[in-house]
Amino acid sequence: MSEIAVGRALSAYPREKWNLATKYPGHQIASSYDPAAVFEEQLQKCGVEVFDYYLLHNVYENSYGVYTDPKWGIVDYFREQKEKGRIRHLGFSTHGRPETVEKFLETAPDMEFCQIQLNYLDWTLQDAAAKYDLLTKRNIPVWVMEPVRGGRLAALSPEDEAKMRALRPAESIASWAFRFLIALPNVKMVLSGMSNMAQMEDNIATFSASAPKTEAERALLMEIAEGLKNALPCTRCRYCCDGCPMGLEIPMLIHAFNDLKFSGGMTVPMQMDALPDDKRPSACVGCGACAAVCPQNIDIPAAMREFAALLEKSPKWAELCRQREEAARRLRGKG
């Protein structure tokens, strides 16, 4: 319904006065998600003949195969629509890991822009820095989603807010998150997120001023980010991996655990759903070989147990499990 609502609202203004973007939901591929059928319906809903920006939605570990499968021909179809002038710029969004983003770009190097989750917390918590660097090296402009982490970075502890106001007494807490992004040269668009007129006015003021961020301010943001995480101090040294009898990618699992502890949400359950059963945290046998060699003295088996328990409580994980069961039933029915 959002495409219908936006289309009706924008129809009151000349087409050359606004840019329109939407996405193709290939991460939820099914027989009803034929690219041509979806695209034609989107144009009709929005009441337009061309999209200025079109994104392949959420290219991540579990959807990579769908987007690159010749059976669906998704990328080729949308390339054709661009050649016909029905799409001006073709890109993609992702919650995938850096290696997945790089793998997709090897198959689709002509992507013109990429939307990632980026803010001063996820710069390290979700390894957004690596994704930003990868896209920048490939000259692919970055679009930003979740710049204030669903509002979490717009309201901090009194102690952290006091530190910020000591340096910039006249500016909002949210503006710090935006200025972190403004300072990144390859960030070209930010989905700023606004719930009321006051927030809109504050965001416009922040982006209009584009005040530079000093080194002292950057250091403060990194300090605050580390305090927000309450994270296990994994340094990705990988000593733990050599002796794991299950062959678990332990550093990746620990960083995902840190992310899930902080915010819950959908990203980590999707990442875990993309792994085989024997590579998820629940596959840990608790032998302790990893903990014995960890330089940070992390009790890794205990962390894996807690991670598995948190995952089981996640609504997104429950939804993914239900979808897997339904898919398995359909396959059994066809058999």
Image (cartoon, rainbow, N blue to C red):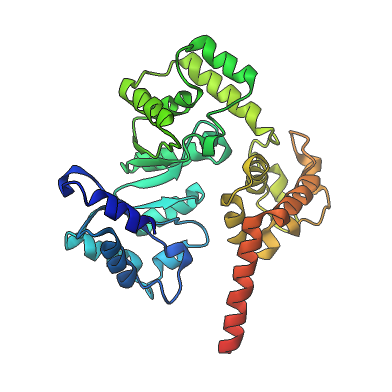
For this rendering, which residue is in front, 56 or 243? Answer: 56
Residue 334 location in percent, x, y?
55, 88
Residue 13 location in percent, x, y?
19, 46
Q: Extreme bottom residue here? A: 335
Quarter of the image for residue 29 reads: bottom left
Q: Is residue 303 left or right of residue 61?
A: right
Q: Extreme right residue here? A: 287
For this rendering, which residue is in front, 150 or 121? Answer: 150
Q: Which residue is rendered at x = 68% and y = 64% of the image?
A: 277
Q: Which residue is rendered at x = 74% and y = 33% of the image?
A: 296
For this rendering, which residue is in front, 138 or 261? Answer: 261
Q: Which residue is rendered at x = 63% and y = 19% of the image?
A: 158
Badge count: 0
Query: Is residue 76 visible in the rendered structure shown here?
Result: no
Query: Is residue 234 visible in the rendered structure shown here?
Result: yes
Quarter of the image for residue 258 reads: top right
Q: Point out the image quarter for the N terminus.
A: bottom left
Q: Is residue 78 left or right of residue 181?
A: left
Q: Point out the image quarter for the C terminus.
A: bottom right
Q: Is residue 171 left or right of residue 257?
A: left
Where 273 falls versus 162 (above or below)? Answer: below
Residue 193 location in percent, x, y?
43, 38
Where 42 falls versus 309 (above or below)? Answer: below
Residue 84 location in percent, x, y?
17, 63
For this rendering, which residue is in front, 59 or 38? Answer: 38
Q: Which residue is rendered at x = 60% and y = 19% of the image?
A: 160
